[in-house]
Structures are given as structure tokens and as C-alpha cells.
Image (spheres, rainbow, N blue to C red):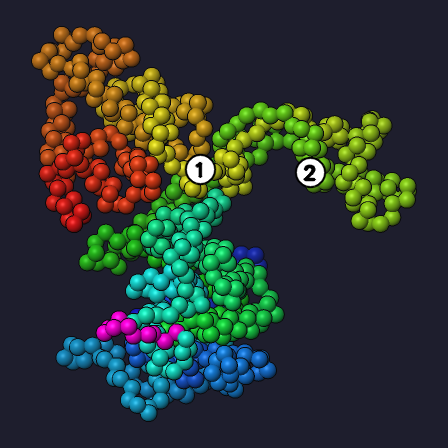
Amino acid sequence: MDVYFQPLVYDLLDMFINGVKTYDASKGEYFQLRAAIIWTITDFPGLGSVSGFVTSGQAACPDCHSLICSLRLGNGSKSCYMGHRRFLHPNHPFRSDVDSFGESELRPAPTPLSGEEILDCTKNLKTIYGKKPSGKPIRNQKRKDGKPLVFLKRRPIWFTLPYWKDLKIRYNFDVMHIEKNVCENIINTLLDIAGKSKDNLNARLDLQALGIRSDLHPIELEANQFYLPPAPYSMSSVEKKLFCQVLKGVKFPDGYAADIRHNVLVNEKKIVNLNTHGNHILLQDLLPLAVRRVLPQEVSAVLIRLSTFFRKLYSPVIRISDMQRLESEIAEILSLLEIIFPPSFFTINVHLMVHLPTQARVAGPIHFRSMWPVERFLKKCKGYVRTKSHPEGSIMEGSLFDEALTLCSRYLQDETHFNHRVRNRLPTQICVTTPFFHKIGRALAGKCVVNLDHKTWLQAHRYVLFNYSNIEPYLNKHAQYLSSIGVRNQRETNHMQHKTFHEWFRLHVEETCEEASEEIKILAKGPMMIAHQYNSYSINGFNFRTQSYDENRSGKTSFIGKSARQLSSAIGCQVRKKLSIATTDWRLVDINKKYELWEDIKTYYDVDAAALNWVMRTAGKKWKQFKASIKQRYFNPELSIKEIPECPDKRVNDDDWHSMYNYWMSSEFQDRSEKAKINRQKLKMHHTAGSVSYACSEYDLAVKLGRPPRRDENFIQTHTRKNGVPTEQAKPIIVRLCC
């Protein structure tokens, strides 16, 4: 990697020593602009390429270097990293707890190497770049017994920069992937996922070989058959199912997180295909809720403390004292985990947690040093790739195209891809009901008029009076009045103001009617007893829903089942009434007519803005079906243009009918029809669901089975005829699925 970094390092060296002449517009003078790099941000395998440190094997921690406490597990064929009591305070009781840990711990915590120490360790290292003359890559030789641990592979090129050796932190540990791996370790071990759990036969055999935790040693029943005694974190089948049901029933606020319920398989007692942000939410927010009901207190308490640790670590504002407390906290948490889980649980990502508070104390909040923005940018770059044999060329071309469009968009008045509004920040017209009040936000669904009871009316009135700055002088006058009648205590004054201010304010304004402004007079009267109520409302970029409205929603807008069919039929009726068929393509239909259709649907049905795309897709489908039915029933290709009859269907006017009749008889339509026939013949597999979507078929099958169907069950359902015989193309696949 140093070969690739060399041009960058030389540019940074020039920027630091010589700088660039830059004009300061505020002072009207030139100055020498200099730049320096303060640290690198990579994932952990990438840190090894950037820093020259070893990131695998027995010396995998750059901060612990040769003093790392690692152990090679013979049966598991992997290294584990324990000994976290070294990071505790010297007088901590865990250091002398022989009963729980087997021995006392007197060693101090290792300290990271300084720049001078790294230079001294690498002064005699010979680095060979590239491949051997034979063309084979250079392989690292295995360490022989008795030889010291190798924790540095080379001197990184960053030490060419004169200030690099003086930096306190040069390489940031990747909190994002550390958190993901820790969460996966915990979930897979608790649910005992085959092939992913850290507690398996090899882990128990390693315990036996080490001579520790005798209560968890495997018991041999027959040849190659073992019984594994239950561990403190082991859950029964019922408890695993309850654990998954807790996660399955979770609903998040709008925009907070993706819907992870489809990742939770309750019957299989698994959590599958959870992305990095899903693990982030699961570890910090959901794990404490799920474990407290199914695990013993000594286990659930430690996992809840671990969840709290990450939540505090992710704080946007931190204090040095808070990070110092977290350093002690994580060392204690890891020590407790060593008592509970087997050594195979302690991978390098679990160990790296002990160094995260120290880095945050020195470098600041992790939001500025994490891989979240880097991964999003890499995903964007991968989206540019069209030629897989030359990905770098595709990325460069896509970046140049993106920059060109960004430049052009600055000169466009309309909304573009690069200046579009943030999600849910829809344009709202300020509806002024009085000179002093205006409507904020946008109603989405469930509008109705309600009569307020006295309690609700009073709460609304008090909220406005106590949170409007122009009422502040009247609040002070009322406090003086209360003081004059003997109310001295501040707490009692606040209580009396809450109870009596609205009535005193009304009477006071009536007495001083000529002095009060129009605004104050309106506020003194209070709100009306009639108000608009909504089931869903968008304000400040967030969607809010009432509990009753949100009961059957997952956080996304989806239309599946009977309600979808009813709404689809209504959309079809509106399409046949409102839209003209005298257009060759749905995309060419007047956009204003489409939005009129959307407004009509919102008038009759309780749908929110997120359903717009679904409604438009359904409308396009109904429009095409209507045109096809008209053509099939009334079009006669043998007639000439002069012999065109009137359309028997009264829903189609004469102009549209003649226009489409002429188009159907044109050579353009004939060519398009032939191409469509050829494309249909290329289809390898036809389904038998007809016009019913896969989502609706899945819903019907779920109602029939009483559970969410599997993908293979839905495939068999949609590729089998009514007589129970599968289609010819799907028959071999269905036979394999049923075996």
C-alpha cells in the first residue's frame, strides 16, 4: 500500500513545508496555506495495510503490540485475546479474585508505542515491495517457538512526514465494524446459531484442554457424540423464541431505523442478513429489552452495561471525565464477560473495545472518526461501476459526470437531484388564519373535526401562554401579584401560576383592553373548542402517527391483502373516468392529470404521501389493462380508416377512440407488437398468479398457513395451476424444492 500512498504523502509533505499561496478575501491579502494529516480512518484489516502493524494472529492489537495477552486455541484453530483485568485500577477487587478468574493479576495495562519507539523497532526491518522475480507473491514465514511476537511488518511511509511521529493517535479503530462484530458474537452465541456460535464443541474442548470451567466440559456419550452442559447464557427453545418475538414486535419512529422484523425468523429462532446499522440499533436499543426476560440477572446485567457503554461512546458531546469512567467501565465489563463466555468468544474486535474510550478521550467524538461516511461514499463509488474489468475508470468517469451535473444544477431554478429537499421536508404553504399565527407542517392522513373537552382545551391554552415570549411580561406581573397576596415560595408560585394564570390573564386584558394589542386580546380569549385532528402529521422533517393509526403498520407504507385490492379497484375506476387512452405510452400521459388522480384518491382513502409511487404504478397498470380490453373487444383490423365505427363503450370519447384506432392500424404499432411477441417468447418461466401480485399471493398464503410463508412456498403457489399441476418450466425446480 505504501506504493499507492507515495504520491499522496509527497503532496502532503509539500503542503506542510512549502504550502500554497492563497488569497484571504476578508483581509484582502495573500497568505501561505499549509495542510497536515492528523490520523487515518480505515476498517481493521485496512489498518494493517496502512500502519504496517499486524492485525491477525497472536499480536493483532496495535496498541498492545508485544504485550498483548493472546492465546492460540488448539481445537478452535483461532487466537483469543483475554486478560482484560490488566486495564483495571491497581486496587480493583477483580485483580485479586482468584476464585472467579483462577489467578491474581498484577500486570499493568500496556501503553501504545510512541512514534520514536516505532521508528526504533523498524530501523532494521527490510521491506520488499511487489512480487518475487518468479512472479509469486512474498509469503510471511511462520514464527518459530521461542521467537518474540512480530507486531510490525514494515515502517509505514507516513513517517516521511516530519510531524507523524509526534501524533498521539495515528490510526483510528473502526467503531462501526467493532460494534457490528460484537453484536453478532453475542446474538449468534445466545441463539446458538450453527456455524456462527462461539460456544460449540471445539470451544468446550478448548476449555477442557486449558483446565478451566470444569462445569462446562463436554461429556462423551458414545463415539464422537458429546453432551454439552448448559452455560449461564444458554436458552431453551421457548426462551429463544421469546427472545425473537420481542425483536419481531419492535416498531421504530419514522426515519429512525429500517424495519428489521423481516430479518427475525421466530420459528427458526434466527436473525439473518442484518446490516451494520441494524446491528447498531439492536445492540444499543433492543438487546437490553430482549435479554432481561430470558437470561439470568448476572448475564443480562453485563450485556445491558455493554449496551450502555456503546450508547455513551456514541454521544455527540463528550467530556474527558466521562471517557475516563468509560475506560474503567469497559475493562470491568470485559472482565465479567471472561467469567461468563468461553475464550473463543474473545475475538480481536471484542478486545479492541477496551481501547475505544482512550481514543475518544484524545481525539474527540467518534462521529468524526468512524467508517459510516466512508462506507456510504464507497457504496456510491461502487454504483458508478459499469465495466467490471476496469472499475477505476468507471468510478472516475462517474465522479466527473457527477461533478459536471452538480455545477450545472447551480444555474437551474427548479429542484434537481443535487438540491432536493430533505426527506419529509415537503413544501408547505403558510396558511395565515390571523396576523399572528400560521400553520406549520403538513397533514398526511386522517383529517377530522373534533370538539375539545375542557381539559384538552386548557392544556392547549396553557402551552401557548407559557411558551410564547410576548407573554413574559404578564407572567412577571402575575408573579408579583402572587407575591403580594402572600405566596413567597418559588415552587408554590410556579404551581399557582400553572393553575390560575390563564384566568388572571383573561381578566387582566379585559380591564386594560385599550392598552393591550390585538395579538394579546386573541391569546387571552383562548383557542376555539373545535379543532382539526389528524392521524398522521409531518413537521420538522419527521412523520408522527397516532397509536391507533400505527397499530398495523411496520414503519413503511405497504398495501397488501384485501385493502390493497379494494384500493386498486378504486384506482382503476378513477383511471377509466379521468384519463384519456389516446396516448401511446403511460409515461406520456399528462402529469397534471396523474396528480389530479392522486388528489382524488387521497380524498376518498386514508393514504399518506409515501403511497404516491404505489398508486402511480397501480394506475399505470390499470390504464394499460383498460386500453387492452378496449382493443380486444372493439378493434377490427380488417376495417379501413373510413369505416371506423363508433366505440360502444361510453367511457371512451370519440376523439380518443379515433386517435387510438388510427394508431393500432399504423405500421409503428405493428412493429411494436412484433417486438413484444418476441420478448414474451424469450420468457423462460411463466407464473400462474395472473394479475395478482407476488405480495398479495404471499399475503393470501400467510392467511392460509397462519404464519409468514417461505420463499419456496410462495414460488410453488405462484407457479402451480388450479388443478395442482405445476407449469412445465417450473416443474423441475418445484420437484427439487419438495425433495
Which region shows up in magenta?
A: 216-225
User: Is 438 located above or below residue 218 in the figure?
Assistant: above
Horizontal and vertical percent position of residue 455: 69, 33
Horizontal and vertical percent position of residue 602: 44, 26
Residue shown at 8% from the left, 13% from the top: 638
From the image, which quarter does the N terminus lie in?
A: bottom left
Side of 504 relative to 553 (left or right): right
Q: Is residue 16 visible?
A: no
Mark linked to residue 463: 2
In this view, the mark in front (2 or 1):
1
Marks 2 and 1, how far apart at CA: 32 Å
Q: Secondary structure at mark 1?
A: loop
Residues at badges 2 and 1 in contact (C-beta under 8 Å)?
no
What residue does disc 1 label? 552
Tell me how many marks there are: 2
Residue shown at 36% from the left, 76% from the top: 217
Q: Is residue 263 magenta?
A: no
* Earlier residue among tags 2 and 1: 2
User: Is 309 located above or below residue 728 in the figure?
Assistant: below
Amino acid tagged 1? Asn
Image quadrant in which you'd find residue 77: bottom left
Horizontal and vertical percent position of residue 378: 34, 57
Q: Secondary structure at mark 2?
A: helix
Amino acid tagged 2? Tyr
